[in-house]
Amino acid sequence: MLNFNWKERYYTAHAQHVNSRTPSIIKDGFYTLPTMPKIKTANGLTKFICNYLNWTNSNATRISSAGRWIEQKNAQGHKIEGSGRFIPGTTRKGTADITATVQGRSCKFEIKVGNDKPSEYQLREQQRERAAGGIYEFISTPEQFFLLYDKIINNEI
């Protein structure tokens, strides 16, 4: 059962994090709430989860499995408009958006917002992570994240 709603939990975690690092900011009245990420987008929900985990003594990072476009340049080093090449990413297909360690547990969170559905690669990667003793879950809302997070920290999974 959640003691706070997800916004309160997010803001409380930030305040406690700031207070543990620089208590004078809060004591002297200079503390301001963080900007709330746009949790209805995959990028926003990913940022929300990474922020929360990093503020609460976990370790989380966003993983980008997409490749990148390299612009072609001329002899003078200037970009040639409309030319270049795509370099594919080097992470394994199905790698989750967030990799984290929560109370010593390996956790992978794949963000699925709106009509986004898991790919066959993500489902396969979920099986691999679970077989190795880790957690790999699909998250689509802050509420869903906190239900899972609470189970992890209470050793229910």
Image: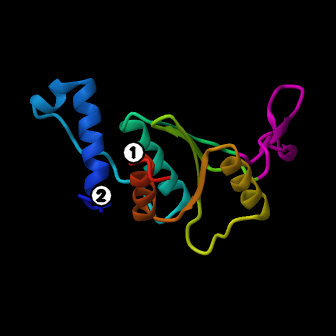
Q: Could you say whether the residue bearing mark 1 is in a helix, strand or loop?
A: helix
In the image, is residue 73 part of the stretch drawn in magenta?
yes
Within 10 Å of the Cα at label 2, are there few (<14), some (14-19), or many (20+) other Cα atoms? few
- Identify the residue shown where x is 29% and y is 60%: 2
Residue 25, picture quadrant? top left
Q: Amino acid at mark 1?
A: Tyr
Q: Give the mark, 2 or 1, whose residue is nearer the N terminus.
A: 2
Q: Which residues are magenta?
A: 65-93
- Identify the residue shown where x is 54% and y is 54%: 43
Query: Which of the numbered marks, if any, corresponds to residue 52?
Result: 1
Within 10 Å of the Cα at label 1, are there few (<14), some (14-19), or many (20+) other Cα atoms? many
Q: Could you say whether the residue bearing mark 2 is in a helix, strand or loop?
A: helix
Q: Is residue 119 above or below residue 84?
A: below
- Identify the residue shown where x is 50% and y is 52%: 157
Left or right: where 57 falls relative to 64: left
Residue 111, picture quadrant? bottom right
Quarter containing the N terminus: bottom left
**Which one is nearer the viewer's eye here, 70 or 100?**
100
Measured as percent of width and height from the top left, residue 84 is found at 87, 43
Measured as percent of width and height from the top left, residue 5 is found at 27, 62
In the image, is residue 19 part of the stretch drawn in magenta?
no
Q: CA distance from mark 2 to mark 1?
A: 11 Å
Q: Is residue 69 above or below residue 25?
A: below
Which residue of the protein is positioned furthest toward the front in this rendering? Answer: 156
Q: Which residue is mark 2?
A: 7
Q: Amino acid at mark 2?
A: Lys
Left or right: where 109 falls relative to 145: right
Measured as percent of width and height from the top left, residue 74 is found at 88, 32
